[in-house]
Amino acid sequence: MAEITDPYPPGTPCWVDLAAPDQQAALDFYAAVFGWTAEIGPEEFGGYSVCAYRGKPVAGIMAAVAMGDQPPPPTVWTTYLASVDAVATQQAIEAAGGSVLMPVMDVQTLGRMLIAADPTQAVFGVWQANEFGGAGIVNEPGAVVWNELNTTDREAASSFYGSVFGIEAAAMEGAEGYFSLNVGGRAVGGMQGLDPGLPAGTPAHWLTYFATDDADATAAKVTEQGGEVLRAPFDMIAGRMAVVKDSQGAPFAVIAPAPLGAG
């Protein structure tokens, strides 16, 4: 079990969450697909649900609620990058050409957060941990295993995340056009150009990958639960994966990682 007990280094993906039109339906969907347990959260947290797997937090699910005269947030998974100072990170985002969509706010005593977009308009979150550090399990079936930036401008994105978070992009051997995103010399995510096969108008975005023992079986389970397979399971350098969307349209990927040393 890949349990996390130490703080996430700045720039490392540390949490993912989903804004869903029907929060309970989303909780039921992911419970069926990944075995998560969760219930509608307390009122003081806006009903936010922290989903657990083997007793550890793995992801958040909230109701998609419109704020003021703004439309409800899109039904997507948001990747949060760790920070030790959310205010300083917000300032760095703006200085590097990004835009702040939701300014720094305190989440009770759990931590501080903000939502922003990079210069290519890929949306991401920032989390400054206090009492809540982020995902307690990663890199195993039922938990997040990878976070991937799909961008319209790799050079602009590399410069932005390097300037704001100190993330370094490096070409991945054996995967043409694919780059690892490194923090402290360790790969914490990936980056590639937008797939030309995506529907017209698809924006730059972060894609969340969840690990599974069997990508084919998980893709079938997604369909059984009212979701859809966007790209059928296929073999690639890191394992066997599929791109799917849940019953309310949120896209994500599932991957059965290749055994270490395979290939």
Image: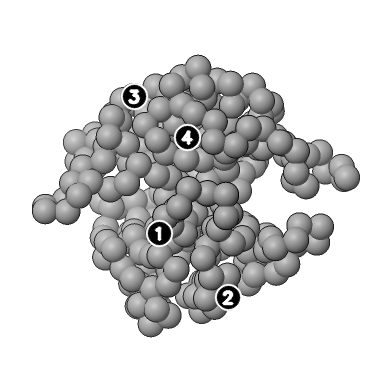
Q: In which quarter of the image is the N terminus?
A: top right
Residue that appears at 31% across and 25% down: 24
Distance Cα–Cα, label 2 vs label 4: 29 Å
The answer for how far apart the CA atoms under marks 1 and 4 are is 18 Å
Q: Callout 1: 10 Å neighbours few (<14), some, many (20+)?
A: many
The residue mark sitting in front, 2 or 3, is: 2
Horizontal side of 102 relative to 261 (left or right) equals left
Depth check, front residue: 175 or 6: 175
Q: Is residue 136 visible?
A: no
Q: 16 or 235: which is nearer to us?
A: 235
Query: Marks 2 and 3, how far apart in space?
Result: 39 Å
**Which residue in the protein does label 2 denote?**
155
- Of 109 and 97, nearer the camera is 97
The first of marks 2 and 4 along the sequence is 2
Q: Residue 245 carries which label?
A: 4
The first of marks 1 and 4 along the sequence is: 1
Q: Which three-letter amino acid code belongs to the residue tagged 2?
A: Glu
Earlier in the chain: of badge 1 and badge 3, it is: 3
Residue located at (87% from left, 42% from top): 262
Q: Which of 91 and 241 is in front in this view?
A: 241
Q: Name the residue under label 3.
A: 25
> Compared to 22, does 79 lie above or below?
below
Q: Earlier in the sequence, mark 2 or mark 3?
A: 3
Left or right, 44 with reference to 205? left
